[in-house]
Amino acid sequence: FLYYSNTYDLFSILAVNSNAIKNGEVWMLITGGFLHVDIIHLMCNMYSLYVIGTQIESFIGKKKFILVYFISMIVGNMLSVVLSHGLSVGASGAIFGLLGSLIYFGYHYRLYLGSVMRSQIIPLLILNLAIGFIVPNINVVAHIGGLVGGIFATMALGIEKKTNRSERINGFISLAVLIIFLCIMIFK
């Protein structure tokens, strides 16, 4: 990246900034998802993306994976703008969206994944949400928004041979209503 003076560092230009987004700088809903506080933050998110992302991509395919990832990131950051203020960075909202996608997928394949969902996925989700509530400076609001966005996005995109047309329509409508509601709350 180019060098910026102290008043315009990368965080002020690219991080999810509630006030700037409300004033029309909506690209921050995406760019903030690629900016991290430090190497540990980046490595934790990269490892999570590697573990969860490879599974989701194998389950739903590359195109749907990319859509779920970006929709989750945007919805998580939108909810963060509505409910919290200040700067936020990181891919955690998108990663929680992938967890939401995994939960939706696991629901349809509960015969095969039911015990894994109960013994590993759901406890992992609860533990990570709890850590977000306990540890300061973690944007748990973006995590919850990403989780919900991931569930609705996967529902709208569907799972091959499992999701029927009405369920996909319901997912699309739910996702659209959520995004419209968040837009109204941000730009009111």
Image (cartoon, rainbow, N blue to C red):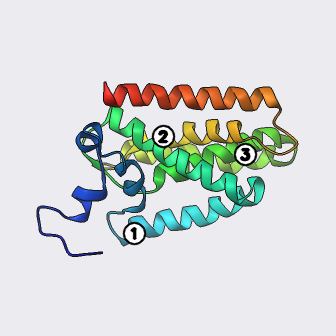
- Residue drawn at (56%, 30%), measured in percent from left and top? 176
Local crowd size for mark 2, using a 10 Å CA cut-off: few (<14), some (14–19), many (≥20):
many
Q: Is residue 7 left or right of residue 126?
A: left
Q: Which mark is residue 117?
A: 3
- Residue drawn at (62%, 43%), measured in percent from left and top? 100
Local crowd size for mark 1, using a 10 Å CA cut-off: few (<14), some (14–19), many (≥20):
few
Circle 2 or circle 3, nearest the eye:
2
Q: Reading the chain from its start, which is encountered first: label 2 or label 3?
A: 2
> Are the residues at dot 2 and dot 3 in contact (C-beta closer than 8 Å)?
no
The type of residue carrying mark 1 is Ile
According to the picture, the residue beneath numbered tag 1 turns out to be 40
Circle 1 or circle 2, nearest the eye:
2
The type of residue carrying mark 2 is Val
Q: Position of residue 41 (x, y in %)?
A: 40, 64
In the rendered image of this protein, does residue 33 appear above or below residue 42? above
Callout 1: SS: helix
Q: Which mark is residue 75?
A: 2
